[in-house]
Image (cartoon, rainbow, N blue to C red):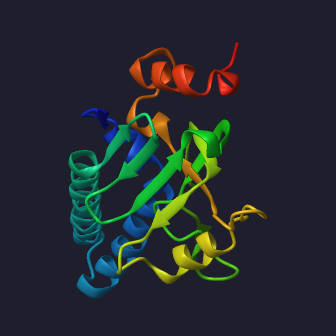
């Protein structure tokens, strides 16, 4: 069995999808701060401090994600696990493709008010393994995520849901390294020529 963990770094890639919501948050805090204090300068300070605090929350979440996410390769298949209790298992025969995997880190609904500025946090996209597998969700999984996962296609024979393991989030060059070697050994038919 081999274990692979996320590399340190990648914070900018993790925070990038939140750039538009953070900019909107800064603008709202700036306006509220300026109105409540009667000073534009204080509004800027309040907006900057509030946005920095929210960015700090994202940094802490990223550190937990990096420290707690592991992908395990074995002769049976591949498993992804994180510190929150989310687990995905794929057996080698049940892999159907290597493709783009969208990982949602926030609800897909837009933020803002109708008719005004609206922003949305896009999914992180990377290349990974797709197939019919098993998924375990932590007890505190948000409702929007449960509903989205419940809509995933299911194998008509086994009833197992379609799941994905975003190996590109662990190592963007996984296909050329030891993870790619595992896939070439067990499912060479799925690897690009």
Counting from the top left corner in percent of width and height, residue 92 is at 56, 39
Q: How many marks?
A: 0
Residue found at the very far right of the displayed protein: 156
**139 above or below 3?**
below
**76 above or below 139?**
above
Q: Residue at x 29, y 35 (%)?
A: 3
Counting from the top left corner in percent of width and height, residue 80 is at 40, 49
**Which of these two is toward me, 51 or 128?**
128
**Which of these two is toward me, 167 or 59?**
167
Residue found at the very far bottom of the displayed protein: 36
**50 above or below 33?**
above
Q: Residue at x 59, y 50 (%)?
A: 102
Image check: 157 left or right of 33? right
Q: Residue at x 40, y 20 (%)?
A: 178
**Which of these two is toward me, 46 or 163?**
163
Counting from the top left corner in percent of width and height, residue 72 is at 35, 40
**Residue 117 in sight here:** no
Counting from the top left corner in percent of width and height, residue 95 is at 63, 42
Q: Residue at x 21, y 57 (%)?
A: 60
**Which image quarter is the C terminus in?**
top right
**Residue 51 in sight here:** yes
Image check: 192 left or right of 51? right
- Residue 162: quadrant of the picture: bottom right
**Which image quarter is the N terminus in?**
top left
**Which of these two is toward me, 141 or 184?**
184
């Amino acid at each position: 069995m081999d274990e692979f963990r996320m590399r340190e770094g990648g914070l900018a890639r993790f925070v990038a999808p939140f750039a538009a919501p953070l900019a909107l948050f800064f603008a709202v805090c700036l306006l509220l701060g300026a109105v409540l204090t009667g000073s534009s300068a204080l509004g800027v300070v309040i907006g900057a401090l509030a946005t920095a605090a929210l960015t700090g929350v994202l940094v802490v979440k990223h550190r937990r994600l990096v420290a707690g996410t592991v992908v395990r390769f074995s002769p049976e298949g591949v498993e992804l696990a994180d510190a929150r209790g989310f687990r995905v298992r794929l057996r080698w025969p049940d892999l159907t493709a290597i493709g783009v995997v969208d990982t949602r880190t926030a609800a897909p609904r837009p933020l803002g008010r109708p008719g005004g500025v609206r922003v949305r946090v896009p999914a992180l996209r990377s290349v990974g393994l797709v197939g019919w597998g098993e998924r375990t969700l932590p007890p505190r999984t948000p409702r929007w995520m449960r509903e989205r996962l419940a809509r995933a296609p299911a194998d008509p024979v086994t009833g197992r849901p379609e799941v994905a393991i975003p190996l590109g989030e662990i190592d963007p060059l996984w296909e050329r390294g030891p993870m790619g070697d595992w896939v070439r050994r067990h499912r060479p038919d799925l690897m690009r020529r």
